[in-house]
């Protein structure tokens, strides 16, 4: 079902991998690095998915790997274009901020404010060196490399990223915002951010990851984030993807939730030439609540593909999923929402809804709810709609004096706002709401 | 104020309005009655500019301007208001929010200054009393979960805020109990003056006890087949529509 990579590509990628191994030298045997070789082998075995693979049916990634591709770019001293951080910043919000350029940490643009007893925020390299217990325990445990070639690729090549550890019982007061800037000013690049977030028992944290790009050369970001949510912990995760048309992204987020924990994951995609999000939440405990919210706005001939999987492994838990999309011009959106309910997962409540608006006749939405339920005492619903904007509300607003453009922007704002409202953190929510309103051409009356 | 000349309109291939003639002067209340399927709501929708209908013949002049040439929002800004029979629900858009934008568009069109937040709120509070509608209801998503009476009161509230020259009430009484009817009618009556006009589209005579018409027209098969005073409405109440239908059909033979 997947294609073996061409010999030429194998040679190139292997050469890059060897170069990396050489660079790591004696460090190759530490926790972080020892899994690389196996991951690389797994990547070669899995190969790159083609559109014949059901999971990649609408998302053709082979152009990414055609031509000379450097899988381990030299550490470029990239400078940030002056406006780039403005695109993703949360100005009114006091927060811990980390900036990565092409996957490399930029300390000068970053600042940590939260006290160390509340949360440890380190780069992976620092975490490994410092021998943080949680790092050793959880790194490489939440994500499995044998299913997804991109995860395997990340495990093989990733050298930098963020490690966040919230000790038991701690609430991190300030959000942690991680900006990933893909820089295509000098050359075609690939970045492999790798993150591990561990929320100890009964802890609470808000984490935001943004993705933006600069320059005109093609940039590909293959990111893998593992999140371990211990018993009773509460995670708010916001992913904001606003890259330009020179950027492609595969974003893998793997979350393992233990009993009585709560997660609220909101993915907002307003940019990027092609974005593929793989969000996987393992409900590995009872009385868990998992919320997955997504909003994607696309135009031109962009593609946004959200593949989600909620795996109800244990009974008595709940998941709620709301993904909404606005597709314009020749944009293509893909949604595949899987819900698995294991046979012992009785009393599972799983709700899924996908709503799409097509603003042009050439825009396309492919939506597929996929429920595999093996328990018999459950409540699972799914619904997907795709259509043009409803004419009745448009006429109503116009009959009150609003012109077509204003009425449309108002209705699109209302449509998108339902997802943005799901974000708990007030300032993060307001900032993102404003960015989306600007995109949709909506001006609030007040 | 409004002059409708030989108006014919289709929906798809079906001709609904088959030549309507109507003159409305400022200060007048005209009732349009008729059996189901006669074209009452179609007439209201065509005047408001709903694109489902295609005007095939005739003209409509509003204060000297060609109404049919105007987009719905321009008609609204010129002073036409349609109170919908089935007001649509719009989740995520509150009455307060959209109305503020709408009012300022109308004011801009009329060469008036936009209302700031404080003035707008003041105007709202004043008009809310007219139809006994609460601020809470106005801050919620438009018509979402509103009862029939609340929806209709919201329509009249908007009418009060926008101060139209010509109001078209499309079966405003449908689905209302006596109390709601009284409140809505009272609101409409309070807004009447010698400079504006009202078209009341209704199936039943009941509403006309409260909103007393100067003229009553009976619409049947896409044409106005009879016009009279409010006594005509009482006659219809008593005798039903059959005699009108018979009269009209015999004239065609």
Image (spheres, coloured by chain):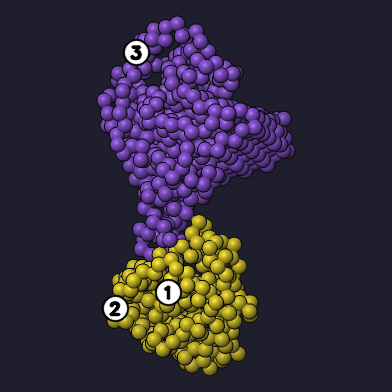
Q: Are marks 1 and 3 on the same chain?
A: no
Instruction: Say above or below: A85 vs B90.
Output: above
Disc sitting over residue B65 in the figure? 2
Q: Nearer the viewer, residue A77 or B127?
A: A77
Q: Please tell me whether mark 2 sits on a helix, a strand or a loop.
A: strand
Name the N-terminal-most of marks 2 and 1. 2
Instruction: Say above or below: A277 vs B14.
Output: above
User: Which residue is located at x 46 percent, y 8 percent?
Assistant: A28
Q: Which residue is mark 3?
A: A12
* Mark 1 or mark 3, whichever is nearer to me: 1
* Mark 3 or mark 2, whichever is nearer to me: 3
**Chain of the residue under the numbered disc 3 shown in the image:** A
Q: Are marks 2 and 1 on the same chain?
A: yes
- Among the chains pictured, the one given yellow colouring is B
The picture places residue B211, in percent across and down from the top left corner, at 53, 86
- Label 1 crowd (10 A; few <14 / some 14-19 / many >=20): many
Q: Please tell me whether mark 1 sits on a helix, a strand or a loop.
A: helix
Q: Are marks 3 and 2 on the same chain?
A: no
The colour applied to the residues of chain A in this rendering is: purple
Left or right: A439 in relation to A143: left
User: Which residue is located at x 42 percent, y 10 percent?
Assistant: A24
Q: Which residue is mark 1?
A: B162
User: Which residue is located at x 34 percent, y 45 percent?
Assistant: A329
User: Which residue is located at x 32 percent, y 82 percent?
Assistant: B63
Q: Number of numbered discs present?
A: 3
Q: Please tell me whether mark 3 sits on a helix, a strand or a loop.
A: helix
Mark 2 vs mark 1, CA separation in Å: 20 Å
The picture places residue B213, in percent across and down from the top left corner, at 49, 88
Instruction: Say above or below: B206 vs A92.
Output: below
- Label 2 crowd (10 A; few <14 / some 14-19 / many >=20): few
Left or right: A212 in relation to B237: left
Left or right: A315 in relation to A217: right
């Amino acid at each position: 079902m997947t294609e073996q990579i061409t010999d030429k590509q194998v040679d190139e990628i292997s050469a890059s991998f060897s170069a990396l191994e050489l660079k790591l030298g004696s460090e190759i045997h530490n926790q972080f690095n020892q899994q690389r070789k196996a991951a690389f082998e797994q990547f070669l075995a899995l190969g790159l998915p083609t559109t014949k693979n059901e999971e990649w049916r609408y998302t053709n990634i082979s152009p990414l790997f055609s031509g000379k591709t450097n899988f381990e770019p030299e550490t470029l001293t990239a400078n940030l274009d002056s406006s780039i951080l403005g695109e993703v910043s949360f100005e009114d919000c006091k927060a811990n901020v980390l900036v990565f350029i092409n996957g490399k940490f930029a300390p000068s643009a970053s600042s940590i404010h939260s006290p160390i007893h509340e949360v440890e925020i380190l780069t992976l390299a620092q975490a490994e060196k410092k021998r943080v217990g949680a790092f050793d325990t959880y790194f490489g445990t939440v994500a499995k490399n044998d299913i997804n070639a991109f995860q395997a690729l990340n495990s093989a090549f990733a050298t930098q990223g963020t490690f966040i550890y919230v000790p038991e019982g701690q609430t991190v007061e300030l959000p942690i915002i991680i900006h990933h800037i893909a820089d295509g000013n000098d050359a075609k690049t690939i970045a492999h951010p790798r993150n591990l977030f561990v929320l100890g028992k009964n802890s609470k944290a808000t984490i935001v990851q943004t993705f933006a790009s600069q320059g005109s050369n093609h940039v590909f970001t293959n990111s893998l984030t593992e999140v371990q949510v211990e018993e009773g912990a509460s995670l708010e995760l916001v992913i904001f993807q606003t890259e330009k048309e020179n950027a492609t992204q595969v974003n893998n987020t793997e979350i393992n939730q233990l009993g009585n924990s709560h997660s609220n994951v909101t993915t907002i995609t307003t940019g990027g030439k092609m974005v593929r999000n793989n969000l996987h939440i393992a409900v590995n405990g009872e009385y868990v609540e998992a919320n997955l919210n997504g909003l994607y706005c696309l135009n031109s001939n962009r593609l946004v593909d959200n593949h989600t999987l909620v795996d109800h492994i244990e009974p008595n838990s709940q998941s709620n999923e709301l993904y909404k999309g606005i597709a314009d011009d020749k944009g293509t959106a893909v949604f595949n929402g899987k819900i698995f309910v294991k046979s012992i997962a009785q009393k599972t409540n799983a709700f899924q809804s996908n709503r799409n608006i097509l603003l042009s006749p050439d825009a396309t939405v492919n939506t597929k709810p996929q429920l595999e339920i093996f328990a018999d005492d459950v409540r699972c619903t799914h619904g997907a709609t795709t259509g043009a904007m409803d004419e009745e509300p448009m006429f109503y607003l116009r009959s009150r004096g609003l012109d077509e453009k204003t009425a449309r922007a108002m209705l699109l704002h209302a449509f998108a706002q339902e997802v943005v409202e799901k974000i708990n953190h007030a300032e993060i929510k307001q900032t993102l709401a404003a960015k989306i309103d600007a995109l949709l051409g909506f001006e609030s009356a007040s | 104020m409004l002059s409708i000349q030989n108006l014919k309109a289709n929906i798809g291939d079906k001709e609904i309005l088959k030549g309507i003639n109507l003159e409305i002067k400022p200060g007048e209340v005209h009732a349009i009655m008729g059996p189901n399927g006669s074209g009452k709501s179609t007439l209201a929708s065509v005047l408001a500019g709903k694109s489902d209908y295609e005007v095939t013949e005739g003209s409509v002049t509003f204060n000297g301007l060609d109404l049919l040439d105007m987009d719905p929002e321009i008609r609204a800004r010129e002073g036409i208001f349609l109170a919908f029979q089935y007001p649509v629900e719009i989740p995520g858009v509150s009455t307060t929010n959209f109305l503020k934008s709408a009012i300022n568009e109308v004011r801009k069109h009329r060469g008036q200054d936009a209302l700031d937040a404080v003035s707008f709120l003041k105007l709202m509070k004043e008009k809310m009393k007219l139809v006994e509608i609460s601020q809470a209801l106005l801050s919620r998503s438009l018509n979402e979960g509103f009862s029939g009476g609340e929806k209709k009161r919201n329509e009249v509230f908007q009418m009060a805020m926008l101060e139209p020259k010509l109001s078209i009430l499309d079966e405003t009484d449908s689905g209302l109990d006596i109390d709601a009817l009284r409140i809505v009618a009272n609101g409409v009556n309070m807004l009447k003056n010698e400079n504006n006009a009202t078209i009341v589209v209704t199936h039943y005579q009941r509403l006309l006890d409260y909103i007393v018409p100067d003229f009553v027209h009976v619409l049947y098969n896409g044409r106005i087949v009879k016009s009279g005073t409010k006594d005509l409405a009482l006659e219809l109440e008593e005798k039903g529509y059959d005699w009108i239908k018979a009269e009209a059909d015999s004239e065609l033979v």
